[in-house]
Each structure stands twice: as structure tokens, then as C-alpha cells.
């Protein structure tokens, strides 16, 4: 019986020394537990999404030295880990030293070579270049290496034979994407299965996305049941920030039997170490202690973990949050309070004459429920003084005249760029951006105003998901810290008399419809355009296409009404809203397609296809 220990390390991006200390600790614990093999995740020494740090030769050499240190730790123990490998005699397509995303194994102080290989590591075969991944920018794949040498991937990809006490384990080691092979020309797992292995080890650095664990289970189960070989999947934890998107890694180490059934799964977002026993004779894999697969919705755990990791990464322990009495700021306040003590949070309400007593009261109730100090800083006089100072100033061919819309934006900017920024400096912390994805999609937010802040924790959530997260936070607290009135009040910026919530006036968005319309622009693998939307509208199946439950004809009585609304928001989405998104703070990525580094955008002009324009003309003529 082979005893295998796993550790879902929280790799610190770029900090090889800190990651090395974690590995030293795990090796000592595994040895003390009498484990035969210790399995660690992909890129556990360097982090994964670290940008062009991969171009620094000094960093590459530091990583090579660290690999040698890990191998030296393997006295009386076999260690398997994912890391960077460099071949200084070859160059990548960019003219820099050849780099591989690789898996290593070592035992008794020495590297183990894959069977028949001249290299002391195996190279990642499938390099993703979609979503946030840029592997092909930095690394050479095993497929490319084979082509370069006039070989097939089958000629190079080989099993490892790992010492395991009195036994030897013939296993196939793959790296993350190598098991997500449904759209690739080759299947690394199928190649290895034909070479007589008894166990797969998948070393991963797979960012968290809502629903991704379910897809992983389905894909792995299908492959493993076809190949009749069990698998251990070892994923990392932690957070990586590329400047626009902050990705969490959930761990969730998992074991699958030879029939592809998920038999064990570690708790998400924890530093759990897991031990498994593997019987080579009958290919059975079993956890030492029961590890029930999670059926928990991971929305709230992901937000609590990711926000906490972001604060640690930037060294912040205090936050200032503008609270309006609306759902977005309330959810952010409750989220941060679930992480930080009350004395480290300052809530600020900044009313003008347009803010109702209802929302001001809800903001105060929220602060009391959370036990946080609330400052009320009326800004009406600030706005009036600024407006008076600017009104009538000379322009080249006119004088300054501030419209009501301009004054609305002045309020939003005063709240963030002046009040919250100054208070966060005085408090010794950061101030938050409370944006949501619906409003960010069409730029319904003021640049340098409510789109300012150090971190936009909830900006990858549609409005309906904001409400859902609020309910989950109340359940987590075990009481309604977010008052029920905040869930039921009309969403409104309250920047003018036209947004009076007491009269049922609010945002210009119908969230029950626009959430789903905007989502269809972004998140499906085959993204929808106005042409697709208008065709579905004409065919009477738009609700099915975008997944909304509201009947579209109940909102828009005529085709003219529908088209005007569609074009209004499409023009904003693909127009000036892009400029706003470019300048917004980093967000916590949880969806299939967050804005920022995941959804790559250029500043373009809105465009409509010929097919759209032809159908529009027909519908308007009917």
C-alpha cells in the first residue's frame, strides 16, 4: 500500500523564498507522517499569473536553484511538484531563453527522469491561451518540442517511476490543462494511459470560477472512466492580481477512482493536507479520513477568501466604505465586516438634498447591525460652492454652465475622490469601490467618483448576484445585518429629483432584464451581438437565449421600443463604457468572463452588422 500526501499550498506570486519555506514545512510533515510520496501543485515555487516577470533571467535562475533545493529535501521521501524549467541552450519564439511549465519528481536527493527522457522533468503538453492565460507567450509546449525534434508527442510524453517505500509507482504526471483536453488535437492522458500507468497525478494552478468545479468533475469523470485509471488532482490556493483581475485559487484537492467517480475532495480555500492510500494491485485509491465532496455554493467563501487575501497582499487592515443605504454598498460593508474587526471599518454616508430619509436611515441601521462607526458628511454645500465657483467662468467661445447631469457627477466625484479618499488617508486604510457588473457594463457610474477605490470586490457580479450574496451574508451572520429594507428599496443613485426612491424612481436599468441581456454580451463562450439578440427577438425566443424569466414584450410594447433600448445600451457597452472600465480598480474575478485581463477590450466604436441593420429595417416597417 502506497501512502500519498498532498498539500494545496497558497503559492505567493513571485516570492520563491516564501514558497520554499512552505515546501520545506510540507516535506517535514510528510516525512513525519510516514508518507511515501508528497504531491504539490503546479508552479508552486513561483506562482502562475505573474506577467512578464518570466522575462527576468535572474528570476529564472533563482527558480532553478529552488528546484534543486526541493530535490535535496527528498531524503527518505519522493516529492512531486510543478515548477519552471529552463533550457539555456535554446530560445523561445520571442528570442528569450527556452522556458517550460514543467513537473518534477525527486527521491533521496536526486531528480527522477521520466522513462527514457533526457530531461529531469516532464513538459506541459497543452498550453492555454484563452481567458486570463498567456502560457504560449512564455512557455514552449511538449507538442512544440516534439515537432522541433521531428517526433510525435507520443514519443516524448512518458511516465515516471516513483520510489514508494518497498514499491514503485508507475504514474502519469500531467499539468492542469493537460486534463482539460476536449478541444485539443491530442490527449496527454490517453497517451500516458497506453504506457501502462496505474495512477494519474494532476498538478494544477486552476483559478476559481463559479461552477468550474462541476465542469471539472464531469470532464475528469468521463476521461477516467474511459481509461480505467484513478487520479489525484492537487490544486493550489492563494490569490494573484494582474492589475485588473484578482484570481483566487480554491485548492479542492480531489481523488477519482478508476471508474471516474469523485471519491474525496478537500475543503475549498483551506490549507488542508490530505493523505491517500493507493493499492496498485486493484487500482484502488482511498483517503485516510473521510473527505466528503462539497455541495456548498462557493460564492460567499470565494468572496471572503479573495477579499481577505487581497488585503493581506497590499498590507491593508483598515477600510473606509461609502454606504448609501443601497444594496451594493451594504453587501460590501457586510463582506468586509465578515473579515475585519468593527474598529477597522469606517462607514461613511454623504447625503445631499436628493438623499431620502429612508436610505439615510437604512445606512444607519446597517452600521448599527455591523457594529461599525458611521460618519455622516453632508456634501450639498461642497457641491454648491464648487458650482458657484465655476459657473460663468470664461471659455474660448462661451462661458461655463453646469447642467443638472454635470452636477450629478460632481456629487459622485466629491464623495469618492475628495471625502472617502481623505478619510481613508486619515484612517490609515483604503476606500472601496462598490460597483457591480451590470452598471460597469454600460458605464452607469462616474469615473473618478463611484468607480474609484482600491478594490472593486463585487464588480464581477450582476445585480441579481449582489442580492444573492447579500442573502448569503445574512445567513452567514445568522441574522439580518443587511436590513430587509435595503433588499426592497428601489435601486437608485439618488443624484437628482428624478431618482427619488420614495416615489418609486430609480436607476434607468430594468435589472430583471438588463442583467441577462448584458450577460449575453460577455459571458457565453459564443458571445451574443445585437444581430443575435434581434434575431431571437424576432423569432420570439429571446428569453430562452439570454436566460431571463421576465417577458420582454411586457417591457417593450413595440419593436421600436425594443430596438431603441438595445442600441442605447450596446452603444454605451461598446463605446465610452470601455474607457471607464479601463480605468476602474482591480476586481475579484469569479465569473466565466470578468472585465479586465480576462475580457480583452480595445477602445473602438459601436458596430452593427449588415444583417442586423436589414432585420431592424424590416421590423420597424412591419
Image (cartoon, rainbow, N blue to C red):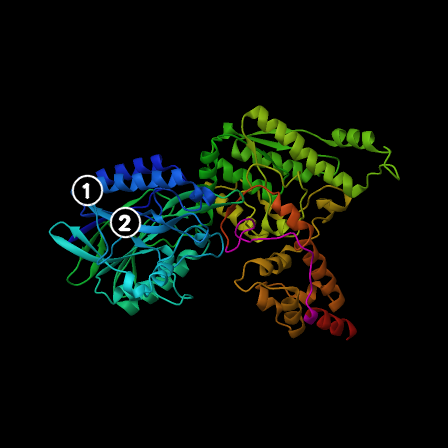
Q: Is residue 363 above or below residue 84?
A: above
In the picture, which quadrant includes the N terminus?
bottom left
According to the picture, the residue beneath numbered tag 1 turns out to be 109
Where residue 145 appears, as percent x and y from the top left, is 35, 58
**Marks 1 and 2, how far apart in space?**
13 Å
Earlier sequence position, callout 1 versus callout 2 = 2
Q: Is residue 198 left or right of residue 236?
A: left
**20, above or below 138, in the image:** above
The x and y percentages for residue 147 are: 36, 63
| 437 relative position to 415: left or right | left
Magenta segment:
592-611
The residue that appears at 74% across and 67% down in the rendered structure is: 557
Secondary element type, mark 1: loop
**Residue 443 in the image, given as x and y percentages of width and height:** 66, 49
What label sits on residue 32 in the rendered view? none
Extreme left residue here? 166
Q: Main secondary structure of the magenta part?
A: loop
- Residue 104: mark in rendering: 2
Amino acid at each position: 500500500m502506497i501512502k500519498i500526501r498532498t498539500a494545496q499550498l497558497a503559492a505567493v506570486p513571485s516570492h520563491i523564498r516564501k514558497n520554499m519555506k512552505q515546501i520545506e514545512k510540507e516535506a517535514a510533515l510528510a516525512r513525519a507522517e510516514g508518507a511515501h510520496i508528497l504531491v504539490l501543485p503546479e508552479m508552486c515555487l513561483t506562482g502562475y499569473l505573474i506577467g512578464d516577470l518570466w522575462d527576468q533571467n535572474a528570476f529564472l535562475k533563482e527558480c532553478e536553484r529552488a528546484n534543486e533545493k526541493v530535490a535535496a529535501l527528498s531524503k527518505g521521501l519522493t516529492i512531486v511538484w510543478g515548477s519552471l524549467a529552463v533550457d539555456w541552450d535554446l530560445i523561445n519564439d520571442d528570442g528569450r531563453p527556452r522556458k517550460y511549465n514543467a513537473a518534477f519528481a525527486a527521491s533521496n536527493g536526486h531528480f527522477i527522469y521520466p522513462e527514457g527522457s533526457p530531461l529531469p522533468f516532464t513538459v506541459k503538453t497543452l498550453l492555454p491561451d484563452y481567458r486570463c492565460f498567456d502560457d504560449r507567450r512564455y512557455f514552449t509546449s511538449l507538442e512544440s518540442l516534439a515537432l522541433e525534434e521531428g517526433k510525435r508527442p507520443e514519443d516524448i510524453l512518458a511516465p515516471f517511476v516513483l520510489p514508494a517505500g518497498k514499491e514503485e509507482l508507475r504514474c502519469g504526471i500531467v499539468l492542469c490543462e493537460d486534463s482539460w483536453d476536449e478541444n485539443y488535437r491530442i490527449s496527454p492522458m490517453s497517451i500516458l494511459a497506453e504506457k501502462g500507468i496505474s495512477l494519474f497525478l494532476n498538478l494544477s494552478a486552476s483559478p476559481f470560477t463559479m461552477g468550474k468545479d462541476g465542469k471539472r468533475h464531469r470532464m475528469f469523470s468521463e476521461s477516467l472512466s474511459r481509461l480505467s485509471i484513478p487520479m489525484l488532482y492537487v490544486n493550489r490556493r492563494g490569490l494573484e492580481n494582474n492589475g485588473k483581475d484578482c484570481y483566487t485559487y480554491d485548492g479542492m484537492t480531489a481523488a477519482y477512482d478508476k471508474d471516474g467517480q469523485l471519491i474525496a475532495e478537500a475543503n475549498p480555500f483551506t490549507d488542508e493536507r490530505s493523505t491517500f492510500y493507493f493499492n496498485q494491485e486493484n487500482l484502488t485509491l482511498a483517503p485516510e479520513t473521510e473527505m466528503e465532496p462539497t455541495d456548498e455554493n462557493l460564492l460567499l467563501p470565494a468572496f471572503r477568501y479573495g477579499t481577505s487575501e487581497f488585503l493581506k497582499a497590499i498590507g491593508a487592515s483598515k477600510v473606509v466604505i461609502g454606504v448609501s443605504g443601497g444594496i451594493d454598498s451594504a453587501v460590501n460593508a457586510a463582506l468586509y465586516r465578515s473579515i475585519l474587526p468593527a474598529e477597522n471599518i469606517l462607514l461613511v454616508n454623504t447625503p445631499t438634498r436628493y438623499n431620502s430619509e429612508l436610505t439615510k436611515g437604512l445606512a444607519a441601521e446597517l452600521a448599527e447591525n455591523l457594529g461599525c462607526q458611521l460618519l455622516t458628511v453632508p456634501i450639498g454645500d461642497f457641491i454648491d460652492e464648487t458650482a458657484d465657483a465655476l459657473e460663468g467662468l470664461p471659455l474660448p467661445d462661451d462661458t461655463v454652465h453646469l447642467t443638472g447631469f454635470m452636477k450629478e457627477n460632481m456629487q459622485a466625484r466629491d464623495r469618492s475622490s475628495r471625502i472617502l479618499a481623505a478619510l481613508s488617508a486619515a484612517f490609515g486604510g483604503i476606500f472601496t469601490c462598490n460597483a457591480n457588473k451590470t452598471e460597469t457594463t454600460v458605464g452607469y457610474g462616474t469615473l473618478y467618483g463611484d468607480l474609484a477605490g482600491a478594490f472593486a470586490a463585487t464588480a464581477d457580479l450582476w445585480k441579481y448576484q449582489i442580492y444573492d450574496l447579500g442573502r448569503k451574508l445574512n445567513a452567514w451572520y445568522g441574522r439580518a445585518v443587511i436590513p430587509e429594507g435595503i433588499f426592497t428599496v428601489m435601486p437608485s443613485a439618488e443624484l437628482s429629483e428624478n431618482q427619488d426612491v420614495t416615489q418609486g424612481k430609480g436607476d434607468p436599468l430594468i435589472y430583471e432584464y438588463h442583467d441577462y441581456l448584458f450577460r449575453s454580451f460577455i459571458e457565453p463562450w459564443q458571445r451574443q451581438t445585437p444581430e443575435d439578440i434581434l434575431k431571437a427577438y424576432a423569432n420570439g425566443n429571446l428569453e430562452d437565449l439570454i436566460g431571463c424569466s421576465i417577458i420582454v414584450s411586457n417591457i417593450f410594447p413595440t419593436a421600436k421600443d425594443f430596438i431603441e433600448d438595445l442600441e442605447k445600451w450596446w452603444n454605451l457597452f461598446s463605446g465610452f463604457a470601455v474607457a471607464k472600465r479601463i480605468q476602474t480598480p482591480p476586481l475579484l474575478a469569479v465569473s466565466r468572463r470578468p472585465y479586465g485581463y480576462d475580457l480583452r477590450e480595445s477602445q473602438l466604436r459601436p458596430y452593427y452588422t449588415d444583417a442586423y441593420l436589414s432585420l431592424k429595417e424590416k421590423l420597424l416597417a412591419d
